[in-house]
Image (cartoon, helix red, strand yellow):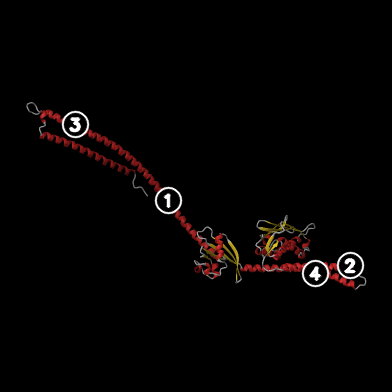
């Protein structure tokens, strides 16, 4: 806004007000003078109409007009004096009013200047505010465009995700339904959005109770789901935390192909382990059987001779019994190892499983370099002999046998005359887990090999030699992580050797 008045116009207004006041004062003075003249006229008329000059008559009855004129002049002078006095008082009052008017004028001018300055300042502030508002509106429009673009981008990401993404509000009404959900379910977004999830798509591989559990506990819920049509899913439920409504986001990933591939890999590793153990078993049985047959042939030949040495025959028969018992032990260990009693887990002592696995390894394991597991110095340190774990005992035996076989292979790669192969096993516990460390002083594992040691396959050619899939521990990792909800890692260097770290949840 602009100020319409300026200082000159304010001065003119003030002077015009002053002139009006002076005119009023002059009018009042004129009225007073007229009243005095009127009074004098009345007095003179009364004098003329009445015999009021008796006091000025001579003895002869004649009027002394000199006295009358003097008296009238005196009265007139008095009246004029009074009038002059009143005029003087009026003039003084007018001067005082003029001074007050001048003071008021100056005050008004100061106020007008102050008001003008305030208005100018307000105008400048208003201009600045208008400019800032215009800039803010411009930024707001830019932000709105960016938000719209971001919303479209996020929507595109959500709809393009390769797994089902479902959004629910507090009443289990569908708020998000991406393209993969449409493809898997056959329900279009327009058909299911705004509807109850389980009424429109009852085949979804999770229950309403699971969603309610995640919302009530305010924690992420993860689980695996299996459908009768042999479909496997990984389901994740994310409860929305800082929202007015307690909604949830559901992610359903179809892992059927991955599960089938893992099962094939597990089966392949099982068959590889069985084949390797069968070959070793054949060798372990063949050696004592050959020695036993040789001794029996010697006994039979000795029986045909006339002179018999009973002591020598007794030694041959005793050796045959010992070798037969060795073969029997190998077969019994293999039968015990392969005997799985259903899918239910049982509570076992971890040190018993490790000890039995060591006995199996001593009977079965050897490597191409000629190193046998029974030639390795194995030391076990158990913090507590009563540490228990809920598990499939035979599967854990397979885990330890695989680690012992891998350790034996790495120990067989060391070609040093003074090298003493050893394996150190340490078992202890913390508040939540049982911790197992298996360390050997064989050839170390490179960082690149450590990256792929638990993977089923790799397209990478490692430096020096191709990392063979037979040397991987995929099956071991599958049993530890998937079957027993544990963890397995490896650390290796030339100074400390190679250490496998395993963690399993404690029982009770």
Tell me the CA gap for discs 2 and 4: 24 Å
Of labels 3 and 1, the one closer to you: 3
In the picture, measured across the screen, residue 139 lies left or right of residue 87, that is right
Dot 1 falls on a residue whose secondary structure is helix
Residue at 66% in and 58% down: 433
In the image, residue 212 lies at what x, y percent? 55, 63
Between disc 3 and disc 1, whose residue precedes?
A: 3
Of labels 1 and 4, the one closer to you: 4
In the image, residue 343 lies at what x, y percent? 67, 68
Residue labelled with disc 1: 129
Which residue is at the front of the view, 329 or 126? 329
Tell me the CA gap for discs 4 and 3: 170 Å
For the image shown, how many numbered marks are present on the structure? 4
Between disc 4 and disc 3, whose residue precedes?
A: 3
Residue labelled with disc 3: 78
Tell me the CA gap for discs 2 and 3: 186 Å
Residue at 18% in and 37% down: 35
Q: Is residue 97 above or below residue 245?
A: above
Residue labelled with disc 4: 286
Q: Give the class, few, some or many, for how many residues have Cα within 10 Å of label 2's Cα (few <14, many ≥20).
A: few
Q: Give the class, few, some or many, for how many residues have Cα within 10 Å of label 3's Cα (few <14, many ≥20).
A: few
In the image, residue 125 lies at what x, y percent? 41, 48
The quarter of the picture where the C terminus appears is bottom right
Quadrant in which residue 332 is drawn:
bottom right
Residue at 75% in and 67% down: 333
Between disc 1 and disc 2, whose residue precedes?
A: 1
Residue labelled with disc 2: 312
Tell me the CA gap for discs 1 and 4: 100 Å
- Whether the residues at callouts 2 and 3 have beta carbons within 8 Å, the answer is no
Q: Is residue 333 above or below residue 24?
A: below
């Amino acid at each position: 806004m602009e100020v319409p008045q300026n200082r000159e116009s304010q001065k003119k207004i003030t002077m015009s007000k002053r002139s009006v006041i002076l005119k009023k004062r002059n009018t009042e003075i004129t009225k007073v003078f007229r009243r005095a003249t009127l009074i004098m006229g009345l007095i003179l008329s009364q004098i003329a109409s009445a015999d009021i000059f008796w006091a000025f008559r001579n003895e002869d009855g004649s009027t002394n007009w000199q006295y009358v004129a003097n008296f009238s002049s005196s009265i007139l002078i008095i009246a004029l004096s009074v009038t002059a006095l009143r005029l003087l008082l009026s003039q003084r009052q007018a001067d005082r009013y003029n001074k007050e008017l001048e003071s008021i004028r100056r005050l008004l001018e100061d106020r007008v200047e102050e008001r003008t300055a305030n208005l100018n300042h307000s105008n400048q502030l208003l201009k600045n505010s208008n400019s800032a508002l215009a800039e803010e509106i411009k930024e707001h429009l830019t932000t709105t465009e960016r938000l719209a673009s971001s919303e479209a981008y996020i929507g595109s990401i959500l709809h393009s995700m390769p797994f089902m993404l479902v959004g629910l509000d507090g009443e289990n009404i569908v708020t998000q339904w991406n393209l993969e959900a449409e493809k898997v379910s056959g329900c279009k977004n327009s058909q299911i959005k705004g509807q109850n999830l389980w009424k429109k798509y009852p085949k979804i591989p999770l229950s309403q109770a699971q969603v309610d559990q995640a919302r009530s506990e305010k924690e992420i819920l993860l689980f695996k789901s299996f459908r009768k049509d042999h479909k496997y899913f990984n389901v994740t439920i994310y409860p929305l935390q800082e929202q007015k409504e307690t909604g949830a986001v559901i992610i359903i990933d179809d892992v059927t192909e991955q599960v089938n591939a893992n099962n094939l890999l597990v089966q392949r590793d099982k068959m590889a382990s069985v084949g390797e153990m069968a070959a070793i078993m054949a060798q372990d049985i063949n050696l004592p059987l050959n020695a036993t047959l040789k001794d029996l042939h010697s006994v039979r030949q000795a029986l045909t001779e006339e002179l018999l040495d009973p002591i020598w025959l007794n030694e041959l028969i005793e050796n045959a019994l010992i070798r037969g018992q060795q073969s029997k032990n190998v077969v019994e260990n293999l039968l015990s190892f392969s005997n799985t009693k259903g899918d239910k887990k049982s509570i076992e002592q971890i040190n018993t499983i490790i000890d039995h696995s060591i006995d199996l390894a001593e009977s079965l394991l050897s490597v191409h370099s000629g190193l046998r597991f029974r030639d390795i110095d194995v030391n076990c340190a158990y913090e507590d002999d009563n540490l228990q774990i809920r598990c499939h005992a035979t599967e854990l035996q397979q885990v330890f046998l695989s680690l012992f076989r891998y350790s034996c292979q790495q120990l067989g790669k060391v070609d040093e005359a003074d090298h003493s192969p050893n394996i150190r096993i340490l078992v202890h516990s913390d508040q939540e887990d049982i911790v197992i460390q298996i360390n050997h002083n064989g050839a170390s594992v490179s960082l690149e090999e450590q990256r792929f040691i638990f993977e089923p396959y790799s397209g990478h050619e490692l430096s020096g030699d191709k990392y063979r899939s037979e040397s991987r521990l995929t099956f071991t990792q599958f049993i530890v992580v998937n079957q027993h909800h544990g963890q397995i890692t490896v650390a290796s260097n030339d100074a400390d050797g190679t250490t496998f770290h395993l963690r399993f949840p404690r029982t009770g």
